Amino acid sequence: MDVQELIERSIYEKIRLALVSEGLTPDIVTNNTDTLYNAALQAIETSKGFSVELFGSSSVESKGERKYARVVLDWVLFTEGDIGTTPEVVYTKQEDGSFSKTVNHISSYEGLLAVAVVCNNIQEVRAINSILRENLPSKSYVPYYTGSGNFLILQESSVKVSQTNDPLQEWVYTYLIPDIFFGLDIAKTGEVTEITSITIETELSNHLGISEEVLVYEEERVFDQTFDNTFE
């Protein structure tokens, strides 16, 4: 999965779980059809006075509708990051015992993500703004929705873009995600075959006064430990 999509989905999931916990949006895990989702959305609207729909940056026509309060995630731009990485080769052990060689992209990027909040009244504004402040504070780490690791997110701004006489209340939060690395390059040399044995010349083993079999075993054991500690 592309890193841009991974970050957006992770932020989406964090906001989604918060909205579900507050009872403001249907849980798409259990309401996994259009009929179930729309029925649950209307039930929330009836019981609480309003409901919230959450959208990512995908091209969904309904995210522009004015029927329900909306939270929309949308990328703004990517710029060069402050921290780079080394172009040195990194070895990763594969299931067959060989080692693949990969190289990080040298440059990092900073991504700017906008979270637009569109509401029909001040009650909706206060509720959604409160959820965003609690779950995406000015500086926090957001866990990857895949369950492994996290990334830093920094709030850049919070601006009300609607006017006093506008029928809708609209806010836009912007968040900076620093040090994004877009993928890896596989080294042209490809895979490195695992070393399974080391041959010791008979003359050397005789000079050391030990059998060749013992020396080969010790060399393999020490090499394997060193290799594993260095590259795994």
Image (cartoon, rainbow, N blue to C red):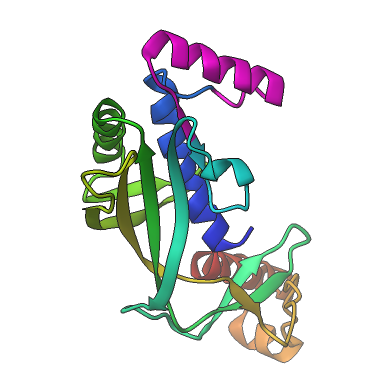
Nearest the eye: 26 or 181 = 26
- Direction top: furthest residue: 47
Question: Would you say residue 109 is visible in this rendering?
Answer: no
Q: Is residue 48 above or below residue 197?
A: above
Number of numbered callouts drawn: 0
In this image, 132 relative to 143: left or right? left
Residue 206 location, quadrant: bottom right
In the picture, the quarter occupied by the C terminus is: bottom right
- Please tell me which residue is depicted at 39% across the width and 78% down the height of the picture: 79
Q: Quadrant of the N terminus?
A: bottom right
Residue 34 placement (x, y as % from top left): 69, 26
Where does the image place residue 119, in percent across and percent down from the top left? 35, 35
Residue span colored magenta: 27-53
Farthest residue to the front: give it.
165
The residue at 61%/65% (across/down) is 221
Q: Position of residue 198 (x, y in %)?
A: 72, 78
The reply to whether the magenta stretch includes residue 217 is no
* Quarter where residue 193 is shown: bottom right
**Left or right side of 168 for 6:** right
Q: Could you tell me if residue 130 is visible in this image?
A: yes
Q: Is residue 31 magenta?
A: yes
Residue at 74% over, 77% down: 191
